Amino acid sequence: METMIHVKRANELIAESIRPLKPVRVPLSSAQGLVLAEDVFSQYDIPAYPQSSMDGYAFAFEAGKLDYQLAGEIAAGSNQQFQLKPGHAVRIFTGAAVPLGADTILVQEKSAIQQGQLQVNDLQLKKGDHVRPVGSEIEKGAKALPKGHLLNPASIGFLAGMGISSVTAYPQPRVTILVTGNELQLPGNPLEYGQVYESNSFTLKACLSQLHIRVAAVLQSGDNPLQLQAMLEQALETSDLILITGGVSVGDYDFTMDAFASCGVKQVFHKIRQKPGKPLLFGTRDEKAVFGLPGNPASVLTCFYEYVIPAIGRMMHSSKSIESKRVALEHDHQKPAALTHFSKALYNGQTVSLQTGQESYKLSSFALANCLAVFPEGETVFNKGQLIDIHLLPQ
């Protein structure tokens, strides 16, 4: 196991340690944001019949002919089938099946009806206008979407329009949040001397909700090694990803590393050369990933954005991560050389400025930030106007 590793190395070790979850069959209604685990093919021609793309009139086009005998109408959804006679036209609506014998649609804005006769007021009209041919969206047997495609709202609608009701995809991880500490009190209850309100589970649940991931369970353990071990074992049995907050430093009441060992979690690394979040702990058991997040709220949030989101992406076979930009710093800044700093900051679309209140226990400044400014290990002086990396926070 490596100790006090570089930020880049931490990301590499997480990527090496996590494999995508096993694909499952998912209802299309629940597939948004998932990655396809197999190619999807169309079972039908779409559209399955020549279809009108406009409200208007259908007929067999004849060059130079400007009037047709009106012979009824066809609404969208009608299963009426008939052969339209030459020289006749039918009223038709968007999405309706074009009758046999018709090949062209005249839009209603360029038509007139006089004594049962359709008058054509479109000298640019040509054969085939405003008719969607059979299979013009996709032909039967054609590949609709490839394996590895990230399903978005348009993908969902496309598949539904082919009659597909479920897909095989990489699932979302089942997540358990495990908070530790005797000092924690739930919001809404009176706060006694020496207690703090427990906020980390609320923060993490909100983060996961932004990723459309539901939390399977939230567990709370006191500073009791046996209780923590039992809860971690329970989480490992039911979840793919476990997020523990607190107990990852080296104090007398920091029991998370002991719980890792007792539950057979292989410790991949402990401590990163960064601020905040230096004590981050990461390990795996079989296909399960466990993060021991520091207890300070800003450290929890920083580590979630920088490490947990990419880990979730790996589990879901996607490249999920927060967006990075390179922008100009609005003011001079200095820091020690030993650590990479992830500083709470505000990006105005052109430049970035640091928030006041960078301490790891402060969420007030994080609440007003929209990015993390990245100041690399080994560099100490940053000048106004210098380009730096920022990581945009999900909004």
Image (cartoon, helix red, strand yellow):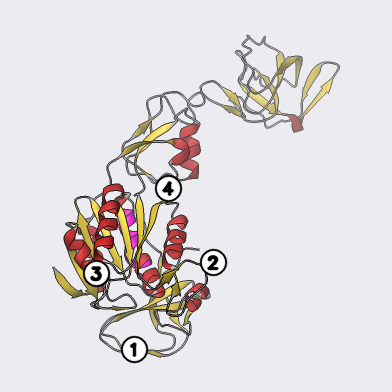
**Considering only order in the chain, which callout, 4 or 2, is on the residue closer to the N terminus?**
4
Residues at marks 3 and 2, CA–CA distance in whole angstroms = 28 Å
Residue drawn at 33 percent across, 49 percent down = 316
Q: Residue at x 46, y 24 (%)?
A: 45
Instruction: Evaluate if marks 1 and 3 touch, with contact meaning CB atoms under 8 Å apart.
Output: no
Expressed as whole percent of the image width and height from the top left, the position of residue 239 reads 31, 50
Question: In the image as oriented, which residue stretches furthest toward the right?
Answer: 115
Image vertical order of residue 112 relative to residue 168, above or below: above
Per the image, is 308 magenta? yes
Q: Quadrant of the N terminus?
A: bottom left
Sequence-first disc among 4 and 1: 4
Label 1 with label 2: CB-CB less than 8 Å: no
Q: Which residue in the protein does label 2 denote?
A: 188
Residue 171 place in picture, x, y as percent: 35, 44
The magenta span reads 305-313
Q: Say which mark, if any, is on residue 255.
A: 3
Badge 2, how many Cα within 10 Å: few under 14, some, many 20+?
few
- Tell us which disc is closer to us: 2 or 4: 2
Mark 1 or 3: the one toward you = 3
Mark yes or no: residue 350 visible. no
